[in-house]
Image (cartoon, rainbow, N blue to C red):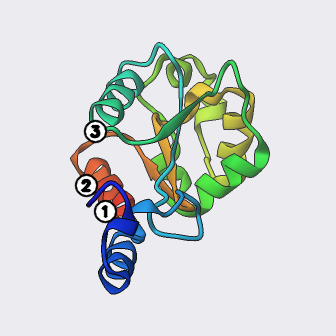
Amino acid sequence: MPRLLMDLPVCVAWGMLFASRESHLPKTPQNKAFSMITVYGIKNCDTCRNALKALKAQGREHSFHDLRADGLSEAEVTRWLQSAGWEKLLNRRGTTWRKLPEAEREDLDEGKVKRLMLEQPTLIKRPVFEVSGEVVVGFDAAAKERLEKLCAG
């Protein structure tokens, strides 16, 4: 594009401006150019670090919310449970799960899991991504594919 649109006839300048308009849209939730990702996790979690490294390498806009340092609201946990389901969101591989008393690990339902997650956020499988109102849990191949689709708009 020429340095000054005034160097071109009006119809050509207007056409160039119109054609390039979408690439100059501000990144807001109202247009599809917005793809801010919020990553919820723990800063010393290897999977979270790998996810953050991959997002940075791809040049994806993101913010990180540390579940330990920044806390966790009941609304966030409720939203994730509704979107992903408690079975997928519950981290049964970590030491926090193994250290729970046997009685806490039995007879699970959404209410009990929600209470446990609010008391001990490390029971949440990490990372949890929020993109355009959608929730993605984990960083396996399926999660990466879903993130890619959500970011593409």
Q: What mark, if any, has residue 145 been given in the picture?
A: 2
138 with respect to 112 (left or right): left
Q: Earlier in the sequence, mark 2 or mark 3?
A: 3
Q: What mark, if any, has residue 149 been given in the picture?
A: 1
Q: Residue 47 falls in which quadrant of the image?
A: top left
The amino acid beneath tag 3 is Gln
Residue placed furthest toward the right: 74
28 with respect to 126 (left or right): right
The amino acid beneath tag 1 is Lys
Residue 67 visible (yes or no) = yes
Q: Residue 101 falls in which quadrant of the image?
A: top right
Specify few, some or many for label 3: CA neighbours under 10 Å numbering under 14, 14-19, or 20 or more: few
Looking at the rendered image, the disc whose residue lies closer to the viewer, 2 or 1, is 1
Q: What mark, if any, has residue 58 been given in the picture?
A: 3
Residue placed furthest toward the left: 141
Above or below: residue 145 compared with residue 74? below
Mark 2 and 1 residues: CB-CB less than 8 Å, in contact? yes
Looking at the rendered image, the disc whose residue lies closer to the viewer, 2 or 3, is 3
Q: What mark, if any, has residue 49 been given in the picture?
A: none
Specify few, some or many for label 1: CA neighbours under 10 Å numbering under 14, 14-19, or 20 or more: few
Residue placed furthest toward the top: 44
Q: Quadrant of the N terminus?
A: bottom left
41 with respect to 24 (left or right): right
The amino acid beneath tag 2 is Glu
